[in-house]
Amino acid sequence: MNALREALQIWYKNHQRDLPWRHTQDPYHIWLSEIILQQTRVDQGLPYYVKFTQAFATVADLALASQQEVLNLWQGLGYYSRGRNLHATAQQIVRDFDGVFPRTYQELLKLKGVGPYTAAAIASFAFNLPHAVVDGNVFRVLSRYFGIDLAINSTEGKRQFELLASELLDSANPALHNQAIMEFGALQCKPVSPNCMDCPVQESCQAFRTDSVAVLPIKVNKVKVRKRYFVYHIIVDPFQNLAFSKRGPKDIWEGLYEFPLKEFDQLQSFQEYVSNKEMIGAKFKHILTHQHIEAYFIKSAYNEPNPSKHQFLCLADLETHPIPRLIDKFLIAHRHELF
Ligand code: SF4
């Protein structure tokens, strides 16, 4: 641990980028830089940092600005909720902390939009408090150097990496240490093509020794979104009842009622199937957490598909027969076109 700590700090002194927020210990400026750099590259965020610090010299100045002024300055940076949060947090500091930036990790966490990473960054960079930052760069360096194949986006992985980052922290120089490991991850131990051949810790790096640099860090796969294409058949019997089927187990909407369904997994066959049919309404899109459904509703003759497979219900029966939200939305929009 000691050797890595020292190597990171020496490397940092020789390779760090000259960035304006590294020349200040003002928590307001450090917070501004951290919020601006979330989901934003340094070269893209830099001019915004300069604009904001010039327009609003203190957190009170920012709090007094109108939201429109703040959003005008934010324009082009994207993720506008961050701009709105920035303004709201400045107002929170004026309102709840008398305009003085909180000085402890726990109090920093009370600020809107400040999570563990940002609180650790402000606590260490502004107040030199011993809190380890753990961002994507730190995860990568730790995972590779120590050869840890726990997924960095799993609960257990996050816990272990946070513990390790705290153990590795140089408590005497937390600001320098945190800057060093983050910069090392950003410039040396990069996600793609890390500079292993000219790395000061190459000899003790587990990933390098075991030829696993390219596979670390591990991330568990996000669940893939499944696309589904539904064609619902609107079949009306001679008594103005509609055909329904009850959905079976091991799929979404188990036990709910829907119109007779033909499902496709390919967009092309789905579109071909409906191309010469009489549709009711336009295509419906329905988004579930891991499934995106597109659905058409088409008119079908009473004898097709086989009506004996279905249950015929009048609309009033739906009070006691639960239906998926997709069917409900369709009925709200088009019930007058069914008969
Ligand atoms: S040897 Fe490569 S993988 Fe290991 S710390 Fe250095 S740059 Fe990262």
Image (cartoon, rainbow, N blue to C red):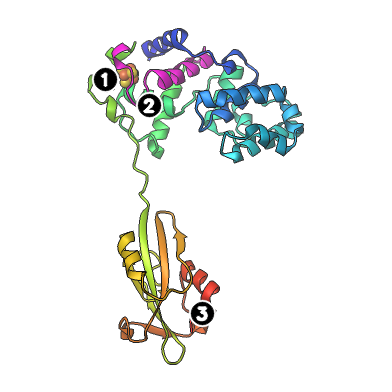
The image quarter containing residue 226 is bottom left
Return the x and y of residue 150 as percentages of the image width and height. 33, 34
Using the rendered image of the protein, determine whether residue 248 is visible from the camera's viewpoint: no
Q: What amino acid is found at the position of numbered circle 3 in the picture?
A: Glu
- The answer to the question of whether label 2 and label 3 lie on touching residues, with beta carbons closer than 8 A, is no
The image quarter containing residue 232 is bottom left
Q: Which quadrant of the render holds ligand 1?
A: top left
Residue that numbered label 3 is attached to: 337
Q: Is residue 20 magenta?
A: no
- Disc 1 is placed on an element classified as helix
For the magenta stretch, what is the residue range?
Answer: 170-198
Return the x and y of residue 42 as percentages of the image width and height. 51, 24
User: Image point 47% across, 8% down: which residue?
Assistant: 13
Give the vertical position of 156 relative to 260 (above or below): above
Q: What amino acid is found at the position of numbered circle 2 in the picture?
A: Arg
Q: Nearer the viewer, mark 3 or mark 1?
A: 3
The image quarter containing residue 104 is top right
Residue that numbered label 1 is attached to: 208
- Assess mark 2: CB under 8 A from ligand 1? yes
Q: Residue furthest bottom?
A: 238
In depth, the one of 198 and 273 nearer the eye is 273
Q: Residue furthest front?
A: 276
Q: Residue furthest left?
A: 210
Q: Residues within 10 Å of mark 2 (few under 14, many from 20)?
A: many
Residue that numbered label 2 is attached to: 140
Q: Residues within 10 Å of mark 1 (few under 14, many from 20)?
A: some
User: Image point 54% across, 80% down: which residue?
Assistant: 336
Give the vertical position of 83 relative to 274 (above or below): above
Q: Is residue 174 magenta?
A: yes
